[in-house]
Image: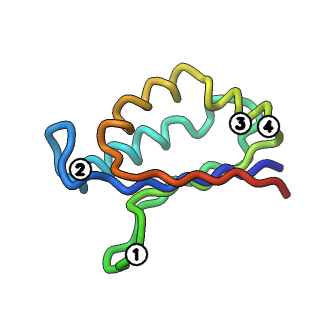
């Protein structure tokens, strides 16, 4: 099983909207990718709870059957289509892949 975890910290304002609006839009865009390819075992998109001092705004916690399934997800046209928005609104990004 290959786990793929990504965290995003969004800009205060971008694409004509504030952080909260962009977090909601990013969450919806990511959730729309939950069943794009065979091999997705888990696909959770979470928004940080308010009040945490050291936190990112949004997290994707996903698991794939193997590296090929993750690669298919990353190359899928619907996933690729959300990248320009994410790049425009994201201030910082962290990603980690690991196997169990």
Q: Give x and y (percent) for residue 6.
A: 55, 52
Observer-nearest of 10 and 29: 10
Q: Give x and y (percent) for residue 46.
A: 48, 59
**Pointer 2 and pointer 1: residues touching (CB < 8 Å)?**
no
Q: In the visual, does 78 lie left or right of 52?
A: right
Q: Residue at image x 37%, y 29%?
A: 84
Q: Earlier in the sequence, mark 4 or mark 2?
A: 2
Q: CA distance from mark 2 to mark 1?
A: 20 Å
Q: CA distance from mark 1 to mark 3?
A: 29 Å
Q: In the visual, does 34 lie left or right of 64?
A: left
**Pointer 4 and pointer 3: residues touching (CB < 8 Å)?**
yes
**For mark 4, what is the residue?**
67
Q: In the image, which disc is placed on residue 6? A: none
Q: Earlier in the sequence, mark 1 or mark 3?
A: 1
Q: Residue furthest top?
A: 77
Observer-nearest of 63 and 88: 88
**For mark 1, what is the residue?**
54
**For mark 2, what is the residue?**
21
Q: CA distance from mark 4 to mark 3?
A: 5 Å
Crowdedness of circle 2 by 10 Å Cα count: few (<14), some, many (20+)?
few
Q: Give x and y (percent) for residue 24.
A: 32, 50
Observer-nearest of 67 and 41: 67
Front position among marks 4 and 2: 4
In this rendering, the answer to whether 69 lies above or below 81 is below
**For mark 3, what is the residue?**
70
Q: Give x and y (percent) for residue 63.
A: 72, 49
Query: Element at badge 3?
Result: helix
Locate residue 68: give its quadrant: top right
Q: Earlier in the sequence, mark 3 or mark 2?
A: 2
Front position among marks 1 and 3: 1
């Amino acid at each position: 099983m290959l786990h793929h975890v990504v965290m995003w910290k969004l800009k205060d304002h971008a694409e004509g909207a504030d952080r909260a609006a962009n977090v909601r839009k990013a969450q919806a865009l990511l959730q729309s990718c939950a069943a794009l390819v065979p091999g997705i075992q888990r696909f959770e998109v979470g928004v940080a709870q308010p009040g945490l001092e050291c936190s990112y705004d949004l997290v994707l916690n996903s698991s794939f059957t193997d590296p090929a399934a993750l690669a298919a997800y990353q190359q899928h046209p619907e996933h690729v289509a959300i990248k320009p928005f994410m790049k425009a609104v994201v201030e910082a990004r962290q990603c980690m892949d690991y196997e169990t």
